[in-house]
Image: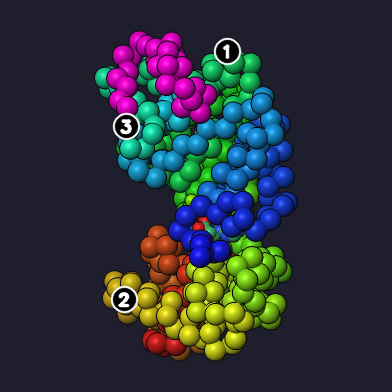
Amino acid sequence: METPFIYGRLAKTDNFTNRAKERSQLANNFIGLINTVIISPRRWGKTSLVRTVADELQQKRKDIIVCHVDIFNCKTEEQFLKNYSNAVLLATHSAWEDFISAAKKYLGRFVPTIAFSDSAQTYELSFGVDFKENRLSINEILDLPQRIAKDKKKKVAVCIDEFQNINNYEDSLAFQRVLRSHWQLHDRVCYCLYGSKRHLLMNIFNDADMPFYKFGDVFFLQKIIREDWVKFITKRFESTGKTISEELSGQIADAMQNHPYYTQQYSQQVWLRTKKICKAEILSEALEAIMFQMSLLFANILDGLTARQSAFLKAIVFGEQNFSSKKVLKKYDLGTSANIKNLKKTLLEKDIIDILPHKNIVLQDPVFELWLKREVF
Ligand SMILES: Nc1ncnc2c1ncn2[C@@H]1O[C@H](COP(=O)(O)OP(=O)(O)O)[C@@H](O)[C@H]1O
Ligand SMILES: [Mg+2]
């Protein structure tokens, strides 16, 4: 029987809870050519959301083309530009002959070489020129979506995943300036830039001195609410002839703090152990299994922390938030309040904690938190 829950892959159609508001907001931005920035911690559902909205839009409307660029593995500007041009060309020219002639037409001057990769069923471009030596080529590549949109008399939406990675480029600020200066002139194209590291993305988009300041709608994708999870989990069980009560479904979501990835994973583990009707014991069993499965990884993370860093985690796990209080500093042996700033910074950079807009500090991983509570502190 095919499993009704998925994690680690994109959630789509049946695997997707409704997220109705976010979906219509994003779709309207695409249609209205409004730039969008989406920020949330990892595994909360950004990629799933963007892909779902794009697919729905492509089915409904012929006047808009959506391109997806993932720059997770792009370590340099050159790689960024290569992925960008590939994604834009491919989305706008899906047939092979079409793709070749478009590559010639728009990028012919750079003599792109085109390789055909059989297994992936996709075309890949690799360029014979170094972009860095020739700023002109960057200009033409960045303007690709606008030029194609004009020629095709369509709108184009360019979605760029893991956008915070541009921070690592050699001269990121200069690159950001170039990007912005081009993109803001595109009147037939909108950009949807999204990624996971809130602090990095906030630096890019929320700082008045930075090129991408006020680039577009910034929205913080939230977790999926409990009510939606309850509906989702009960329905997914039903679809396979199994039953789970609303109460137990709610407990699954609660234990995972509504975290999208983990709620799916936990649901899956519970579903696998359920023959016909789910019982409370199954929930505890499944949770043990997940924690056991993760424990080695968690132990490694903990090993990589200093005593102070792990003490700081302990304080968070026990619900402390007031880190300027002498009492808290002493109780957890955190040193002086000047230390706290560094602790926050490092743990944020390690992706272990997150600082929410109202300055609340939380652990990013709800299972890590459970594990720390039970096994360590
Ligand atoms: N709308 C949704 N409904 C149900 N599960 C979801 C939804 N969005 C995400 N998920 C779950 O979360 C996991 C991570 O989603 P993903 O889109 O890859 O997150 P991100 O791009 O933010 O890292 C998915 O594999 C899926 O299990
Ligand atoms: Mg993603």
Looking at the picture, does residue 58 appear above or below residue 63?
below
Residue at image mark 1:
151
Q: Quadrant of the C terminus?
A: bottom left
Question: Of the residues tagged 3 and 2, which is closer to the observer?
Answer: 3
Please report contact status of discs 3 and 1: CB closer than 8 Å, yes or no. no
Question: Of the residues tagged 3 and 1, which is closer to the observer?
Answer: 3
The residue closer to the viewer here, 365 or 90, is 90
The residue segment tinted magenta is 90-117
Coordinates of residue 214 in the picture (x, y in percent): 61, 38
Q: How far apart are the two marked residues, 1 and 2, measured between alpha carbons?
A: 55 Å
Please say whether residue 305 is one of the residues in the magenta stretch.
no
Residue at image mark 3:
117
Please give left or right for residue 348 compared with residue 61 in the image.
left
Residue sitting at x 72%, y 38%? 28
Disc count in the image? 3
The answer to whether residue 182 is visible is no
Looking at the picture, does residue 347 appear above or below residue 278?
above
Coordinates of residue 362 in the picture (x, y in percent): 53, 71
Query: What colour scheme does the image use?
Result: rainbow
Residue at image mark 2:
296
